[in-house]
Amino acid sequence: MSSIQPIPMKFRVPEIAFPKGWYCVAEADEISADTLKPVSYLNQQLIVYRTQSGAAQVADAYCPHLGAHLASHDGCIENGAIVCPFHKWKWDGEQGHCVDIPYAGIPQSRSLSLTLHPTREIDGMVLMWYHPANAAPDFEPYVSSALQQHKWVLFDSIEWVSTCPYRDLYENLFDTAHIVQLHGASKMPVLRSMEQRAHGLYVDYEIDPSAEQFSMKSLTAHFTGVTALNQLFEGEGWATNFVISTTPLDNERFIEKVRLYVRDLGSKEMNEMIGKPWIERFKFEVEQDFKVLNYKKHLPQPKLCGGDGPIYQYREYANQYYV
Ligand code: FES
Ligand SMILES: [Fe+2]
């Protein structure tokens, strides 16, 4: 255990800012049309629920009337309407409009509205759009085609709270030197290609079967902006898919959540044979990373040398999301 304490982020990053993008705020199976799930991310209080048509929706948790938290006390959602616990005003869960004030009738103005956030339900995650200037979404999140095509089992999911500077987390994947030096891999990974796609970055790695414990055929990664990542590993007769999201709680911390899907091999034992070593290796490496990352500082001008990997290339990509 480290005896150092991470110092406040304002001393470790040049400017505290959350990038625009799609942030996971709940798991799809955690929400329903008859409960309000309160969550706190990106310095905001939010509620997550399903509308009457079944769509996932994220809204501000504070009632526009007098600021009650909509999920406090007996605040609820009933027949598609959110009922505030304070004065029982009702808000339409789909559009946000106020649809009833018990002691003043139905409001005439449609502008009296709860703030709803653009929401998508993808690969088991509920994603909310965030833009620092409240602009509308200008890209869509990555949807895994592999997860749609085959039968998978959700083998495990793990989450960590990290105090790493947010922008330095995914950069770690392009810092190839640390993969040998910190993680002890026998060889540095080689990136075959890095390509900008509509959802974000697509990365394809070169596979060296001699350096791999799991006879791997391909490793590809799809980033949704700089807030989520899908890593697909394929081998002879097996595949694993890591669905990863990273969402700031506040200026100091973010949650990294990893869900491991294993392509169903038909029995629990077989799936375990693949899933277990993968999740263990992943967990071990993430925790190894956090031993350093949680205390690091973001250096705008690092002193890089040959062999450090495409860190600047990743930063150039990431910068477009910091508006
Ligand atoms: S604060 Fe919500 S109805 Fe008054
Ligand atoms: Fe790492």
Image (cartoon, helix red, strand yellow):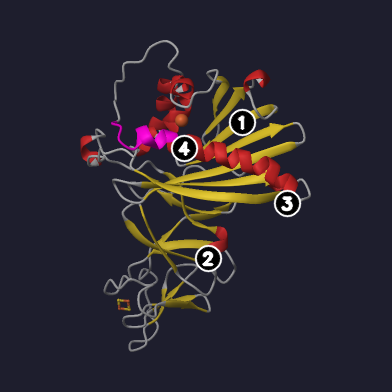
283 lies above or below 36: above
Residue 77 appears anywhere in the view: yes
For the point 50% across and 37% down, which residue is it? 284
Residue topped by disc 3: 268
Looking at the rendered structure, the kind of residue marked 4 is Val
Circle 1 — which element?
strand
Relative image position of residue 73 (x, y in whole percent): 35, 78
Query: For disc 4, does the CB lie below 8 Å from ligand 2?
Result: yes
Circle 3 — which element?
helix
Residue topped by disc 1: 220
User: Dividing the picture into quarters, in which one does residue 109 lie?
Assistant: bottom left
- CA gap, disc 1 and disc 4: 18 Å
219 within the magenta span? no
Relative image position of residue 114 (x, y in whole percent): 38, 67
Residue topped by disc 2: 31
- Circle 1/circle 4 CB separation < 8 Å: no
Q: Badge 4, how many Cα within 10 Å: few under 14, some, many 20+?
A: some
Label located before the other in sequence (3 or 2): 2
Which disc is residue 57 wearing? none
Of circles 3 and 2, the one toward us is: 3
For the point 67% across and 30% down, which residue is it? 214
Label located before the other in sequence (2 or 1): 2
- CA gap, disc 4 and disc 2: 28 Å
Looking at the rendered structure, the kind of residue marked 3 is Lys
Q: Quadrant of the N terminus?
A: top left
- Circle 2/circle 1 CB separation < 8 Å: no
